[in-house]
Amino acid sequence: MQLQVARIPSGYAKGVGRSMNSLHWMAQILLASVFLFTAAGKLFAYEKVVKVVETRSKGRPISMTRWQASVVAVAEILGAVGLLIQGPVEPPQLIVLCAAAWLALLMVGAGIYHLFRHESAAPSVVLFLLALFILVGRWPQ
């Protein structure tokens, strides 16, 4: 009995590469959209965000000043924009890699913040994993 190895069609690898590239672009657009949306809330509707968070956490204060929320919002905007642009650097995906790493690091901080407030860190973990997916997928071969 001889073991037969299935042959992969010659165009298969190119098709997988294209579909993974599309998947990474969809993840980048999704992650950038989420961060742009949350940053806009922190910058332009801080009072409403505070009210919603304090109501959800049974009246506990948010423990983040408007200035701190603005700094976090600007960091989120920089990361989101970095996910969507290609720069004149070598390797070409360096900006995307840095942005994904930056957003993953922000989500580690957000997860710690939510755990200290005895809230669910699940959204932070999901966004961290999405940033990690982009980081690993865009890493140069």
Image: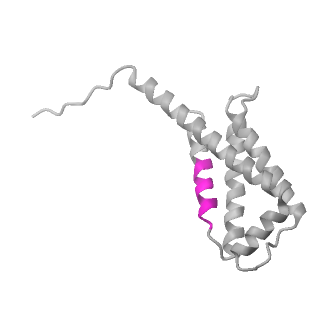
Q: Position of residue 139 (x, y in %)?
A: 60, 38
Q: Residue at x 79, y 72 (%)?
A: 62
Q: Residue most toward the left? A: 1
Q: Position of residue 100 (x, y in %)?
A: 67, 45
Label the magenta part by its dominant secondary structure: helix
Q: Residue at x 67, y 53 (%)?
A: 104
Locate the C terminus and report the quarter of the image it occupies. Answer: top right
Relative height, residue 33 to residue 86 (above, below): below
Left or right of 48 in this view: 119: left
Residue 62 on the magenta span: no
Q: Residue at x 71, y 63 (%)?
A: 110
Left or right of 70 in this view: 108: left
The magenta segment is 121-132
Relative height, residue 105 to residue 64 (above, below): above
Q: In this orientation, which residue lies closer to the viewer: 45 or 17?
A: 45
Kindly indicate the quadrant of the structure image that contains residue 2: top left
Q: Position of residue 82 (x, y in %)?
A: 74, 39
Q: Is residue 86 visible?
A: yes
Relative height, residue 4 to residue 133 (above, below): above
Q: Residue most toward the bottom? A: 59
